[in-house]
Amino acid sequence: MCFGVYMSPNPDSGRYDLVKFIKEIQAQGLYVCLRIGPYIESEWTYGGFPFWLHDVPGIVYRTNNEPFKLYMQKFTAKIVSMMKSEGLYASQGGPIILSQIENEYQNIQKSFGEEGSQYVDWAAKMAVGLQTGVPWVMCKQTDAPDPVINTCNGMKCGETFTGPNSPDKPALWTENWTSFYQVYGGEPYIRSAEDIAFHVTLFIARKNGSYVNYYMYHGGTNFGRTSSAYVITSYYDQAPLDEYGLLRQPKWGHLKELHSAIKSCSATLLQGMQRNFSLGPFQEGYVFEEEGGGECAAFLVNDDNVNVFTVQFRNRSYQLPPKSISILPDCQNVTFNTATVNTKNNRRVINPVQAFSSADEWEQFLDEIPNFDETLLISNSLLEHMNLTKDKTDYLWYTIRFEHDLPCTESVLHVQSAAHVVHAFADGTYIGGAHGSHDVKSFTLQVPVTLNEGTTNISILSVMVGLPDSGAFLERRFAGLTTVEIQCREESYDLTNSTWGYQVGLVGEQLDIYQEANSSSTQWSQLGNITNQRLIWYKSVFDSPDGNDPLTLNLETMGKGEAWVNGESIGRYWISFHDSKDQPSQTLYHVPRSFLKDSGNVLVLFEEEGGNPLDISLNTVSTTNSEDNLSK
């Protein structure tokens, strides 16, 4: 199996120790496709780019732009040098058999015209010139320059892939999506084991495919603030190995049987001549046979979604279930059918091991709501959110001192935002909030506001839930407030180009309140009234549960915010954003045991919306065999 590895902006430190990870892959007998990018998308904030790149003068990402190419080449060369120095390429006896440059560039190439085509040629030449001794690939890039291999990404590459753009290139499937990423307000995408197996087999049979990389085979967790706009913290939990590393059956077992069947005839598939023939209106066969009547392998395809079909092949009858492919490694005996699942389902079991229900075990810290006079940065316009925060925080305060002497009855605060969330306050009192969604790029807050006679301090907290990760001209994206008005019965006041004050981040963030050392020196207080408390930090301490089962924090009674354990962020949560079935998109948050000590573990929550920490719990995660499809 080949392990696809995307690059981090910091590939040589802490949990991002790339060399150590590649060596561990090799120790486990696996191979590596090193997907250097450096643009990766992957639902990773800013597509994997560090935000400082945005501030390089004259830069335009992913085109024939000298500043961008300079940094792209430096990064790519650094990664290649790290791998070479440790002997990790297959040409050196290591596990890396492929490298990838760029990622799905053809999706945006037309936006750059001829400059885009020049960039593709440059990127290919630059990568090949690094002389890794293994092939380079460009995924979803039909015009990948020789010798770079064009590859397929998607769920149905046996149907959609147009094939290699040169006869001496193999057919490679670099991303077979076993599920799909999930966003807040969205539901999980469930892809069946049968569907995955069908399309893997079809790719091998029809396209003469020699490589399939599952995306993802192992689910994961977007710790910290790493997920892109609106993407939940859990990532591809429906993969054959779930977010916690547990088997998700029958997907894992069914694919294991498929891999065994393919492996049993792999020599014939690689050495034999391929031919195909019709077996019916929606049925076809593919045969791979070595010269001189040697070994033979066959694939019998029924592309009818409804009906069982019996086909005749080499004087034998074979019954094919609907939408299935039978594999005959010897052209006689069926060893696997993609629609015949022998593995039993399992289901996830969540067992509470610790409650946090005692108010005495919690402390709190109320964050501050700044007003105009307390801010240091002043501007006569609404400034762009990301350019101020530099991806160091999700939060940016916009503050204004609204002064008026004329009557203003039935006053309403009207805010248009291109960020993700806004919370509005008047003289420190919460008056309302609103949010957008993954598919709606801007939104409006309209909320009644009580104005003082004379001066009213308006404070608006703009919130990002990840940065954008895809599309052309990523460096030009705008986020934050776009218009602000106070609408009265008598007249309206457009505040968009008024004098605004700004504060980047929260007081708690400036204090690093979630770090254990700093948390102990912060002026925490005993838990008070938690009803509708907004912009508040909570802290509790717990011991590590016995055993080795994975752990998860159930935050279903919280609203929106972020959670830390011993200073490690386990990700953003947004329980209050419900899907079409009125359910939160995610309530369980992975707590790796490697983050824990035996005792005295510090849990810190930042809550934006008034959630209740007294009903959260720490739980173990396991699986049990089941005949049903129950899954939490």
Image: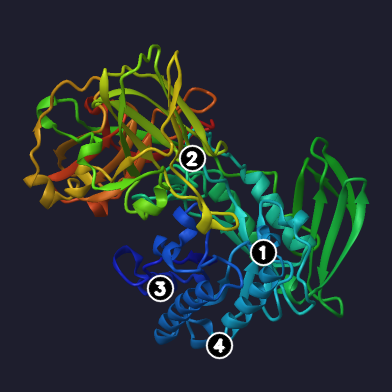
- For residue 65, what is the image quadrant? bottom right
Alpha-carbon distance for marks 3 and 4?
25 Å
**Pointer 1 residue:** 112
Name which residue type carries label 4. Answer: Gln
**Pointer 4 residue:** 131
Left or right: where 614 falls relative to 347: left
Left or right: where 52 falls relative to 545: right
Alpha-carbon distance for marks 1 and 3?
43 Å
- Tell which circle, 2 or 3, labels the residue nearer the N-terminal end: 3
Name which residue type carries label 3. Answer: Ala
**Pointer 2 residue:** 418
Alpha-carbon distance for marks 1 and 2?
25 Å
Decide: marks 3, 4 in contact (CB < 8 A)? no
- Tell which circle, 3 or 4, labels the residue nearer the N-terminal end: 3
Seen at 44% across and 74% down, the residue is 26
Instruction: Report whether residue 546 is seen.
Output: no
Who is closer to the viewer here, 507 or 158? 507
Position of residue 281 measured from the top left corner of the image (x, y, whole percent):
93, 45
Q: Secondary structure at mark 1?
A: helix
Q: Secondary structure at mark 4?
A: loop
Alpha-carbon distance for marks 4 and 2?
44 Å
Seen at 76% across and 52% down, the residue is 326
- Up the image or down, 124 lies above or below 502; here it is below
Tell me the mark number nearer the camera, choosing from 4 and 2: 2
- Tell which circle, 1 or 4, labels the residue nearer the N-terminal end: 1
Decide: marks 2, 3 in contact (CB < 8 A)? no
